[in-house]
Image (cartoon, rainbow, N blue to C red):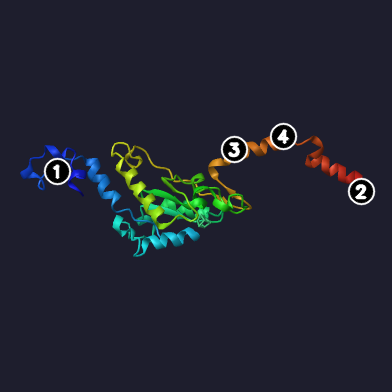
Amino acid sequence: MDENELNLRPNQIPEELKGSIAVTTLDRIYNWSRRNSIWPMMFGLACCAIEMIATAASRYDFSRFGMEVMRASPRQADVMIVSGTVTKKMIPQIVRLYNQMAEPKYVIAMGACASGGGPFKEGYNVVPGIDRFIPVDVYIPGCPPTPQALLNGLITLQKKIDSESLKSVRWYQKGKIEPIPIPVLGPDLIDPRQSPLIKELCQSQISNVSPAGTPENLEAHHDNQLD
Ligand code: SF4
């Protein structure tokens, strides 16, 4: 780390002791070590993933940020780069992978699709943004974002990590961090967190059905027709 970046008050260290002594905080050391070794999870969803792969290759080379070790296991990854169109079919898998990542963990929504549905926003099979299901730390606009844009997003994530404090980070708070309920994919996607709302809406619709539409009345109507 650069001396001025490491030391809280670089000017107060005597010249002869510079290089041997550092006056800093635990937060700075802790955040510095984490921000320079963010390992991304190795997965991609659509065309944006090609740009992510290009960012990892030699021309842009995100190993300069300590991020070159893409992990095939969520248990060893620190950041999930959601790169591509998020279909309803993929949501249960993405949430499951997010739950399997160990804290501290971060999420980057790369591109218009992951951030808000993109050109497929109104599609029957696409969710309008991954942030409906998992918390997102950095959004990267573009369709697709260029490798430079992804690098800028990673630098933004580093700045966010710099601003965190050991006292307030969620993974050192008391109590268990509950996993996100895995959405259920049936005829459509159901987020279990919305179950009370769905139940309430269904009940209000049932109670609004006119008596003529109840199953008993429909049966009687059918019998009359046969007579
Ligand atoms: S944002 Fe554009 S480039 Fe990225 S996955 Fe969607 S359609 Fe493809």
Q: Earlier in the sequence, mark 4 or mark 2?
A: 4
Q: Position of residue 117 (x, y in %)?
A: 55, 50
Question: For the residues carrying marks 3 and 4, which lies nearer the camera in this image?
Answer: 3
Q: Secondary structure at mark 1?
A: loop
Residue that label 4 marks: 207
Q: Crowding at label 2, few (<14), some or many (≥20) Cα neighbours within 10 Å?
A: few
Residue sitting nearer the eye, 37 or 18: 18
Distance from the alpha carbon under mark 4 to that under mark 2: 29 Å
User: For this view, does 106 lie left or right of residue 85?
Assistant: left
Label annotation for residue 22: 1
Say which residue appears at 28% left-offset and 39% top-offset. Answer: 166
| Number of the front mark, 1 or 3 | 1
First along the sequence among labels 1 and 3: 1
Q: CA distance from mark 2 to mark 3?
A: 41 Å
Mark 1 crowd level (few <14, some 14–19, many ≥20, 10 Å Cα): some
| Residue at x-position 87% and y-position 46% | 222
Residue 39: x %, y % from top left: 34, 56
* Whether residue 104 is visible: no
Mark 3 and mark 4: Cα distance apart in space: 15 Å
Q: Name the residue beneath numbered marker 2.
A: 226
Q: Earlier in the sequence, mark 1 or mark 4?
A: 1
Question: Disc 1 and disc 4: Cα gap in Å?
Answer: 70 Å
Q: Quadrant of residue 196?
A: top right
Q: Kindly identify which numbered label has been placed on residue 197.
A: 3
